[in-house]
Image: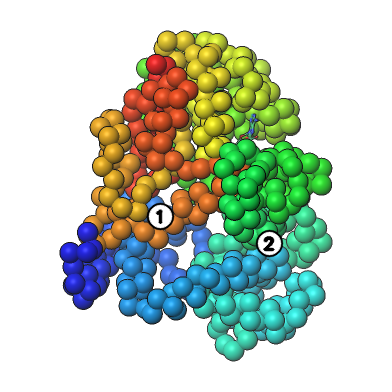
Amino acid sequence: MSSSFTSLQELRELVKLVNTSFTGIEKACATQKTDLPALNGTFSWQTEGILNDPEVEKASSVITAAASQLAAAVRSPMLSLFAVANQYFLSVSLGISLKTHIPEILREVGSKGLHINEIAARGQSGINPDKLGRILRLLATNHIFREVMPDTFANNRVSGSMDCGKNVKDIIADPDSKYDGTASAAAMLELSTVDGTVSFADISKMLFDPKYANSGKPNETAFNIATGSDLPFFEWLSEPAQAVNNKKWATAMNSFDQFTAQDVILKGFDWEALPKGSTVVDFAGGVGGQAMILAKEFDHLNFVVQDRAPIIENDATKFWKEKFPEAISSDRVKLQSHDIFSPQPVKNAAVFVVRAITHDWSDEYCIKFLKQLRAAATSNTQLVVIDNVIAYACPDSQETLDIPGAAQVRPVSPTPLLPNFGTASAMTYLLDISLLAGLNGKERTVAQFADIYQKSGWKLVSVHADGFNYHDIKTIAVPV
Ligand SMILES: C[S@@+](CC[C@H](N)C(=O)[O-])C[C@H]1O[C@@H](n2cnc3c(N)ncnc32)[C@H](O)[C@@H]1O
């Protein structure tokens, strides 16, 4: 670990890591006969493709982790801390740029950019041009947008990725529908910045409140304190008053498909080996996106997609009617309204797929629904939980590493990087805290998964990680 280095040695090692990783990126670009997309270039999914190359992905993580470790080492601690303490303004500025449609306005004028007076006028939000300019300058200083001339801004590749693709005129005519029909990740960014999440980012109220401090309840959170609602987040989102946020949430969830490989569900579990006619339950499956990928690939399997009644009756029904109607008409796929805490109606499931669910709930609640699944399981039923796995920021030698596949979840970081790749893994840790604030949810280590399984009558038997990340990890359990 880093403690064995002198300060200059450590910095030299970090610089070396940046250099060797950069050489790896150059080689991958040469092999693929392509270039890295330029920071000041235009965003497109096609040119971003090289970043998904496993070598480039790994090199990118090393460079990100090393660069931030270098900055932490060479900068005055007070400057680092001041930047963190005021990060909130960066977050809100990002949201303001979305609310005023800056990425779309700047796309329409191209690389020459536009003066702040004209940007403010085109957005018709009533924002003062000088104040907007200061917001955009803070963002440009953080590599989001470019100030091409004094008070004149253009998109760069980062800000361009927030462009929802619609005409500014159409957006302004109906701002509530801005993200309809798109898969824009900007919908999630808006929800995370100006649409309310900021109000519950202050989790101190939740952590120090005598009633909330030790609660695992989904409606005793920073979100509840901030909004005054006593509904759990997802129920609140279904309220008629939240219709616009609800639409945005649906777009945000769809947008994740662009970042995650669509075949992850197919890997790390032998679906082919399940006997013909086996039933796979997509538990709290949303519209049933995972079941659909599996149903298209394995026609010997049947599926039940379960979720809350409004999701099943509206979104899921529409989704399957549009994309795979024959699966419904042939009865191979059934859509079923089901509350995860009530007794599981499918008693002959070969597999319960539980994706992006456990991290929404505290241990207490996970154990409740896992017990319901266990009560309905046969001795051959398998539980396939797909979620993020979180790692400690220090070396970890827990006994679960003996479980097949568990060690691969933690790629070994080169010294002197943090074992969890530091800020290259920041998303997982930020998500963990936002789950805490909004839902009393939690990202878990492999050992913590093993623990909730053991407490609900399941036994963790294997772990499968696909690629170089902590996302979409499969933990597979069987009845005890
Ligand atoms: C993050 S989404 C994951 C959806 C899906 N598994 C996927 O991977 O796309 C969480 C899902 O849990 C569902 N959910 C939340 N509370 C529920 C409950 N009490 N009963 C059934 N489903 C619930 C939500 O409606 C939502 O579809």
Could you tell whether 432 is left or right of 127 in the image?
A: left
Q: Decide which of tag 1 and tag 2 comes sooner along the chain.
A: 2
Residue 134 in which image quadrant = bottom right
- The residue lying toward the viewer, choosing from 400 and 24, is 400
Q: Which residue is mark 2?
A: 194
Q: Counting other residues with Cα less than 10 Å from the Cα at mark 1, is it few (<14), some (14-19), or many (20 or more)?
A: some
Q: Where does the N terminus fall, quadrant-wise?
A: bottom left
Q: Residue furthest front?
A: 210
Is residue 235 shown to the viewer in this render? Answer: yes
Q: Quadrant of ligand 1?
A: top right
Tag 1: residue type? Answer: Ser
Could you tell whether 139 is left or right of 479 in the image?
A: right
As drawn, 476 above or below 81: above
Query: What residue is shown at x 42% (from left), y 21% (from top)?
Result: 458
Query: What residue is shown at x 46% (from left), y 34% (from top)?
Result: 386
As drawn, 86 above or below 349: below
- The residue lying toward the viewer, choosing from 417 and 7, is 7
Q: Which residue is mark 1?
A: 425
As drawn, 479 above or below 286: above
